[in-house]
Amino acid sequence: MGEYSKALSSYERSLAIRKITLPPNHPNLATSYNNIGLVYDNMGEYSKALSSYERSLEIQKIALPPNHPNLATTYNNVGLVYDNMGEYSKALSSFERSLEIRKIALPPNHPDLATSYNNESAFEYSPMLLYTKP
């Protein structure tokens, strides 16, 4: 547990192989970037996490339908990074986009939908939003 460097190394090896063997906008590349982002987020390296998630989103927007659940997951991850960075209005925007997609893509009792409602609600009622600029 907590062996981030080993996880990062494995995910980067996976990405390197996928870059060689897959087309440039294959969804599995997006998954690799998302996994790398998760590790960076857990390490507290938020700018690197955000960069990885943004690359994942770029690929997903090309490779997947606009309301695919994987897009919602990545938007949620972006929101978590912005939250960790103290950029609450950007976090809320990402959580809202995640929720929009999940409302369309998932059944009404899906646990991921509950996560999105929870994340958005936490920000809608947070006093921290009063201190952030849109």
Image (cartoon, grey):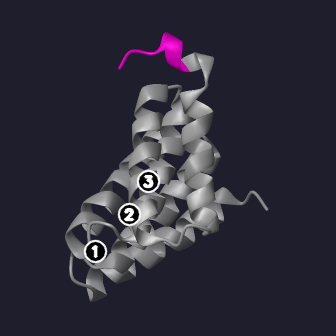
- Of the residues shown, which amino acid type is indicated by label 1? Leu
User: Which residue is at a point 37% across and 82% down the rendered structure image?
Assistant: 17
Of labels 3 and 1, earlier in sequence is 1
Label 3 to label 2: alpha-carbon separation? 7 Å
Query: Which residue was labeled with disc 2?
Result: 71
Q: State which region is magenta.
A: 129-134
User: Which residue is at a point 58% across and 18% down the rendered structure image?
Assistant: 128
- Which residue is nearer to you in this view: 89 or 32? 89
Q: Where is residue 119 in the image (x, y as percent from the top left)?
A: 59, 43
- Of the residues shown, which amino acid type is indicated by label 3? Ser
- Which residue is nearer to you in this view: 7 or 74? 74
Q: In which quarter of the image is residue 96?
A: top left
Q: Quadrant of residue 66?
A: bottom left
User: As displayed, is residue 50 above or below residue 13?
Assistant: above
Residue 94 covered by magenta stretch: no
Query: Which residue was labeled with disc 3?
Result: 98
Q: Which mark is residue 120?
A: none
The reply to whether residue 81 is in sight is yes
Q: Is mark 2 on a helix, strand or loop?
A: helix
User: Which residue is at a point 56% across and 31% down the rendered structure image?
Assistant: 123
- 58 lies left or right of 3: left
Q: Do the residues labelled 3 and 1 touch (CB within 8 Å)?
A: no
Q: Position of residue 95 (x, y in %)?
A: 47, 45
Query: Which residue was labeled with disc 1?
Result: 64
